[in-house]
Image (spheres, rainbow, N blue to C red):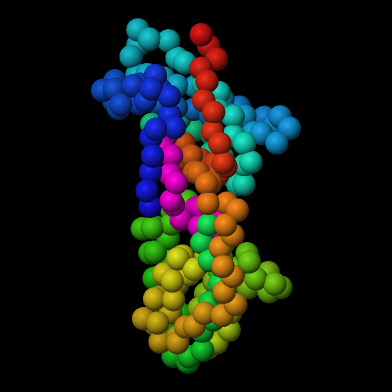
Amino acid sequence: MSYTDNILPKDLLDIINSHDFGDEGGILISSLSLEDDDEIIKLIVDSGNIDTPNQTWEVVISAIKEEKINISWCNHIIFHDDHYLLWEFTDDQTSLYFNGEGGNGKELLADIYKIHRSYYNYLDIERYILEKRDGLRNLDLLTLCNYDNGLFAKGPKKILQSYYNCLLANSKKPYFLDNTIASQSTPDLKLLLVGNSYFIGKNFRFSRIDC
């Protein structure tokens, strides 16, 4: 993963990098709205200095692809131009199958959960393992992990490689099929993380609106 802070306005960066903000400050998503093809979010920024009033910033996001909203105060806002949340749009897509008896389904499931806690904490564990499947909507993860063969997951190859390694370590003989080369039309997507919320889009325009 790589990140960039040169999209954030200098005035906002100065607040975020200040000692007061690190100790007592925070950011809150106060509203969201749509205007044509743009999404507009408003942020309340508390500098952490009791003598400085809160600021209100507007972020206009064009060509938004995906978002996840968690309305709570946080102290972290950052941009990424390479991140696992972007891989659905920028990485090769594939299907991961397995064919091998043996292994312990509970141990395999525990390994998958460990991977998500360590590396993919913004993703629901079911996203590529269950949600991308055709049919079998009532299938649960443990039942799948106890199967001897079948489709395990569909999605970005970089993420599925982690599942591949888990299956291999648990005697499941994994293999990939149906690779789809990543589209070249979305290489300029960026990710904005605001605490536990995220936004994926092409352009992000910040402006302070309480001045």
Indicate whether 90 appears above or below 189.
below
Given residues 68 and 71, the one toward you in this image is: 68
Indicate whether 69 appears above or below 182.
above
The quarter of the displayed image where residue 40 is located: top right
Q: Give the image location of residue 191, x and y in percent.
A: 49, 43
- Bounds of the magenta span? 76-89
Q: Is residue 111 left or right of residue 65?
A: left
Tell me if I can see residue 3 in this picture: yes
Given residues 48 and 1, the one toward you in this image is: 1
In the rendered image, residue 87 lying in the magenta stretch gets the answer yes
Q: Tell me what residue is drawn at x 59 percent, y 29 percent.
A: 60
Q: Is residue 21 left or right of residue 143?
A: left
Q: Tell me what residue is drawn at x 51 percent, y 89 percent.
A: 99
Q: Give the image location of residue 101, x and y in percent.
A: 47, 92
The quarter of the displayed image where residue 64 is located: top right
Given residues 57 and 197, the one toward you in this image is: 57
Residue that lies at the very extreme toward the front in this rendered image:
184
Tell me if I can see residue 154 in this picture: no
Q: Give the image location of residue 132, x and y in percent.
A: 63, 66
In the rendered image, residue 91 lying in the magenta stretch gets the answer no
Q: Tell me what residue is drawn at x 47 percent, y 15 percent.
A: 55
Q: Tell me what residue is drawn at x 42 percent, y 10 percent.
A: 53
Given residues 123 and 10, the one toward you in this image is: 10
Residue that lies at the very extreme toward the right in this rendered image:
36
